[in-house]
Amino acid sequence: MYNKDFWNERYVSEEYIYGKEPNEFLHSRLPNIKKGKILFPCEGEGRNAVFAASLGWDVFAFDQSEAGRQKAIQLAKEKNVTFHYEISDALTYPYAPEQMDMVALIYSHFHKSIRTTVHRNCVRTLKPGGLLLLEGFSPEQLKYTSGGPKDPDMLYQLKDLRMDFSEMNVEYEETLETELNESPFHRGKASIVRIVLRKI
């Protein structure tokens, strides 16, 4: 698993290693959803949180990397938006019950030993009727060099996600081969999963 030192080292450069533009799937979906409180776990350099804030969402984010948070705050200043960003890891973050209208997990990969716990905490913090949107790499991604964990126990299959989010209704899901062009770290042919669920 990737620890705090790994991410601080990755984010320490001035360059935004995953770019400043939001994830394509989030970009296509978020403008059409009623605005409210949204949580971005493992948000890194802030590209998705800043995008949500620019649309008028009340944005909450966390990451274990201080370097990531610093760049996220700088990006927010550039875009003239504000949001709440805490330093925390995914297991210890205080997921307040029924506080969020949406949770967005964008390439937030957790080892299978903690994945279900983190995902169920994300469900717990959603209000009834709240949405969860996830995009991540599938096990087929091991064939490609466009990014993602190299540990198969950190890659996602829809069947496992359905189990993790079993108390939610699936509104959309797919596994697809695509061409990533988000940054030097997410570029090239890729195998990804996408799922959108609503809390009952």
Image (tube, rainbow, N blue to C red):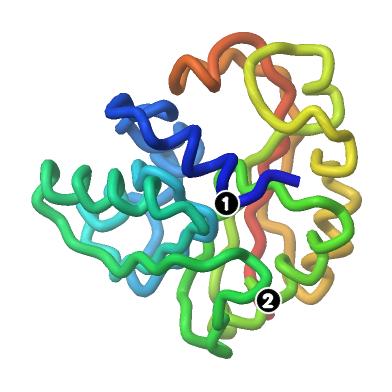
Q: Which residue is label 1 attached to?
A: 4
Which element type, helix, strand or loop, lies under badge 1?
helix
Say above or below: 35 vs 32. below
In which quadrant is the C terminus drawn?
Answer: bottom right
Is label 1 or label 2 in front? 1
Residue 180 x/y as whole percent: 55, 18
Say above or below: 191 vs 54. above
Q: Which is nearer the N-term, disc 1 or disc 2?
A: 1
Q: Residue at x 58, y 84 (%)?
A: 128
Say above or below: 116 vs 49. below
Q: Residue at x 11, y 42 (%)?
A: 78
Q: Is residue 172 left or right of residue 39?
A: right
Label 2 environment density (alpha carbons within 10 Å; few <14, some 14–19, many ≥20): some
Q: What count of labels does the image hold?
A: 2
Label 1 environment density (alpha carbons within 10 Å; few <14, some 14–19, many ≥20): some
Q: Is residue 180 left or right of residue 171?
A: left
Distance from Cα at disc 1 to Cα at disc 2: 20 Å
Say above or below: 28 vs 49. above
Residue 76 x/y as whole percent: 19, 50
Q: Which residue is label 2 attached to?
A: 121
Which amino acid type is shown beneath numbered disc 1? Lys
Which amino acid type is shown beneath numbered disc 2? Asn
Q: Residue at x 30, y 32 (%)?
A: 20
Say which mark, if any, is on residue 178: none
Residue 53 x/y as whole percent: 25, 57
Which element type, helix, strand or loop, lies under badge 2?
helix
Q: Residue at x 67, y 41 (%)?
A: 194
Residue 195 x/y as whole percent: 68, 48
Q: Is residue 13 left or right of residue 103?
A: left
* Contact? badges 1 and 2 (CB < 8 Å): no
Where is residue 116, by image quadrant?
bottom right
